[in-house]
Image (cartoon, helix red, strand yellow):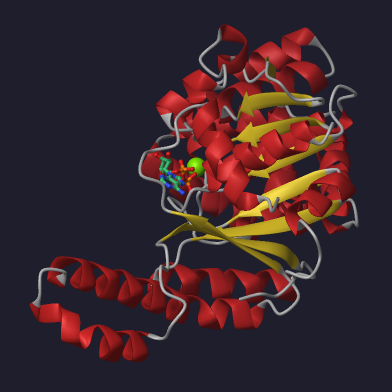
Amino acid sequence: MTAGATIPDPIGVLLEAHDVVVCVGSGGVGKTTTSATLALEAARRGRRACVLTIDPARRLADAMGLDSAAARGSRPVQVEGPWSGELWTVMLDTRVTFAELIETYAPNPEQARRILDNRFFRNIADALSGTHEYMAMEKLHELHADDRFDLVIVDTPPTTNALEFLDAPNRITSFLDHRLYRILVTPSNTLARAMNVAAQTVLRSISRIVGASVVDDVIEFFANFDGMEEGFRARAVSVRTLLASERTTFVLVTIPRRDVAQEATTFVGDLRAAGVDVAALIVNRVHPNFSPRPLDELRARLGPLSDGPLAPFVTALLDATTIAGTEMDHLAGLTGALPTAAVRLVPFLDADVHDLAGLERLRRHLITG
Ligand SMILES: Nc1ncnc2c1ncn2[C@@H]1O[C@H](COP(=O)(O)OP(=O)(O)O)[C@@H](O)[C@H]1O
Ligand SMILES: [Mg+2]
């Protein structure tokens, strides 16, 4: 559990030494709160930090200015406070980000309008699997290139697989290379000629199920992508390079529950297979351990007191020690899989973290000294 503890303030070192910090982990463990806390710490260290949040709890979003019109439009907003650097927040809105991409990169405004008015785009595009991850990646690309920030902290979408985000650039490039895409982007008047019999049969079957107009919408949508795919490909390649580079580091957030810690251990293996090392493990919502002694010894020593007036306290202390011990057992496999990572335990606070004061409390636990 003390891996990395010899380096002073390892989390602070990570925040100073990188341009991008990616927070990964299962949903509900405190990933959004932790990302915001890391950005706060970076701002205190003089960095101009921007945290890209995915699904902030309502009250935290309000406290960080994310209820403003700018934030609702996916624009970064600055949070004022007593730090030497800057703290910025931006909320990922998949639909707005997608629309802005099209407006920015379409060869002309009419083509952008045709895509944005397309029924397929309006009804289906943001429900497609992977769109969240893909838009998070595009937003990261945009924020990283933005001169106002020198550190971007990314709160990844709540998927069960850490690789979905990492894989988004590969998926878009392989999609653009896919034969089906090539067929779809062929202008519709030459479509029939260009398509082979098999592809036509597939499209006919799809039409029968979802309706010919849906297929037409899809074809029109992709046909209008003409002239934009190189940009999509170039950005995907550039984010892939950024994520794999020394400028980026990965922080894994978890809680000391058996199933979640096991899922996190799987993440670690998957990330490692993809060439990514987790630099820090943040274990959130840990119950305090009041006793430095092992449970058995504690039980033996306190035994004589358990019938007297102190009985309720003895029970409470033994219960707390049992919980703390069980939590550490749950984490053993995970910390064993991360022998070189910095490990930080953050306690289960007595209240939700819904404002800057709450983030500040978390921050003090996250950072030594
Ligand atoms: N250490 C903590 N102690 C108490 N409450 C916490 C702690 N960390 C997070 N929370 C609360 O847990 C809830 C979920 O946190 P959130 O960061 O939104 O999780 P995630 O992004 O992983 O889904 C929020 O209400 C948050 O205030
Ligand atoms: Mg979240």
Q: Camera-side residue: 284 or 310?
A: 310
Rendered-image quadrant of the N terminus: bottom right
Left or right: 73, with 297 as reference point: right
**Residue 201 in the image: above or below residue 231:** below
**Residue 256 image position (x, y, % from top left):** 44, 67
Q: Residue at x 49, y 27 (%)?
A: 355
Q: What percent of the width, then of the height, locates residue 163?
A: 64, 61
In this view, the residue in front, 136 or 38, is 38
Q: What residue is shown at x 77% (from left), y 9% (from top)?
A: 109
Q: Residue at image x 73%, y 30%?
A: 50
Q: Residue 96 appears at what percent x and percent y?
A: 60, 21
Left/right placement of residue 87 relative to residue 31 reads: right
Q: 146 and 77: which one is in front?
A: 77
Side of 344 where 305 appears, left or right: left
Q: Does residue 184 appear anywhere in the picture?
A: no
Residue found 45% across the figure and 41% down from its top: 207
Residue 112 in percent (x, y) is at 72, 15
